Amino acid sequence: MRKIITVTAIFLSALLLISGCRRKEPVSPPSAGSREPTPPSVSTTEPAQEKTDNAAIVRKAIAGKLNKKPDELTTEDYEKTTELVLSGTAVSDLTPTKELKNLQQLDLRGTAVSDLTPIKELTSLKLLFLGGTAVSNLTPIKELADLHRLVLSGTAVSDITPIKELKGLQQLDLSSTAVSDLTPLKALINLQDLLLSGTKVSDEQVDELKKALPKTTIYR
């Protein structure tokens, strides 16, 4: 009997020892030094837009016409330039064209040009294409007495009063503009063709102009 008690006691002690070994060790909280690194912040600031180099655009156009490189242009090259095509380019400021004193044709269609002040002294201009530009004020070009053709289609022009000073004008395109008053055109005795499609010009306005300029062909 004493042996049975002894064996039982030994067995129970072994069980207690085994269960004690299986206890989980407590988990310590992470130390400050073991925290995960904070991901780097992402900047939301948009990069600054690159400024348009209008002078470079003009030089490139002139050089292309003369089969030269832009850095090869001379003062004489500027003086003898009579045609400048900038249509479809990123040009927005016409200041670099002020040196082109003998310019006769200027094409600015589809550009961001809005201010015509820089070309007011280019009195040799005969053809001026401004279709699809942001031009709205025509005052700067009222002194261009030699202008024969003026294209303003698709612009924000609504007041054409300055045009009455262009006595030599032969062709005028006002299509798709906000022009509604044709009275200033009555002074253009040399006007041959007038385009008015896409405007809000009334029939009465057209009839009055036809009486004043019977030789002018009006397209609507």
Image (spheres, rainbow, N blue to C red):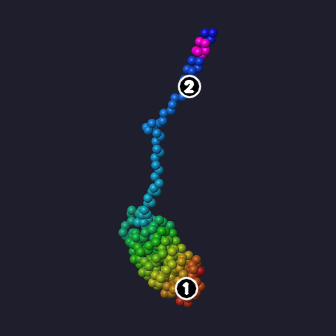
Magenta region: 5-11
* Residue labelled with disc 2: 22
> Residue 75 versus residue 177: which sits nearer the camera?
177
Residue 171 in sight here: yes
- For the C terminus, the quadrant is bottom right
> What residue is shown at x 52% (from left), y 80% (from top)?
171
Residue 80 vs 49, above or below: the answer is: below
Query: Which of the 4 image quarters holds residue 141?
Result: bottom left
- Please state the horizontal and vertical placement of residue 219, each as a whole percent of the image: 58, 81
Between 138 and 91, the one lying in front of the other is 138
Location of the N terminus by quadrant is top right
Q: Nearer the viewer, residue 132 or 124?
A: 132
Whole-percent x, y for residue 61 in the image: 45, 66
Which label number is shown at residue 30? none
Percent position of residue 120, x then y? 41, 77
How far across and down, in percent of the image, does residue 144 sit?
Answer: 43, 80
* Contact flag, marks 2 and 1 (Cβ < 8 Å): no
- Number of other residues with Cα within 10 Å of mark 2, as a class: few under 14, some 14 to 19, many 20 or more: few
Q: For residue 9, what is the image quadrant?
A: top right
> Is 61 above or below relative to 15?
below
Residue type, mark 1 in image = Thr
Q: Is residue 85 in view from this perspective?
A: no
Crowding around mark 1 (Cα neighbors within 10 Å: few <14, some 14 to 19, many 20+) is some
Residue 216's disc number: 1
Which residue type does callout 2 highlight?
Arg
**SS label for mark 1:** loop
Query: Residue at left 55%, top 77%?
Result: 175
Q: Is residue 159 magenta?
A: no
